[in-house]
Image (cartoon, rainbow, N blue to C red):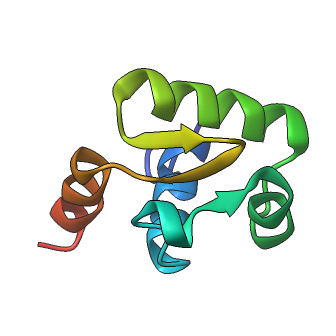
Amino acid sequence: MHVYEISSSMRLLIMLHNMSAICPEAAKSFDEIKCNCCIDEKELYSAIRELLNYGYIIEKNGYYYLSTLGISVVRSIFT
């Protein structure tokens, strides 16, 4: 990875924020996420697992959205 390249998991976190996936009602399915990002499927699964393990995203019935911690992480990028 290049020093200025953003990891797949961080790109996914930012993308979920940009898609307003910040609560259960706005959660996105894997297919919706896959259609809106430029990450191959295997790498996307890995990024999702990583974000789930860190507690940055929440999965509910196959839909994903940012946790409050995940929202804070994204916001810290822009401040």
Residue 53: percent from the left, percent from the top?
44, 21
User: In which quadrant of the rendered view does residue 61 lie?
Assistant: top right
Q: Position of residue 3 (x, y in %)?
A: 44, 44
The x and y percentages for residue 68 are 23, 52
Specify the quadrant that holds the N terminus. Answer: top right
Placement of 50 over or under 24, stated as above or below: above
For residue 31, above or below residue 36: above
Image x and y of residue 10, in percent: 47, 49
Quadrant of the image occupied by residue 12: bottom right
Residue situated in front as seen by the camera: 35 or 78: 35
At 36% from the left and 26% from the top, the residue drawn is: 54
Residue at 55 percent across and 78 percent down: it is: 19
Q: Is residue 2 visible?
A: no
Image quarter (top left, top right, bottom left or bottom right) of the C terminus: bottom left
What residue do we see at 22% from left, 46% from top?
Answer: 69
Q: Is 11 in front, or is 72?
A: 72
Q: Can residue 48 be seen in this snapshot?
A: yes
How many marks the image carries: the answer is: 0
For residue 27, above or below residue 10: below
Q: Residue furthest left?
A: 79
Determine the residue located farthest toward the top in the rendered image.
Answer: 53
Does residue 34 appear to the left or right of 24 in the view shown? right
Q: Relative to 51, is 3 above or below?
A: below
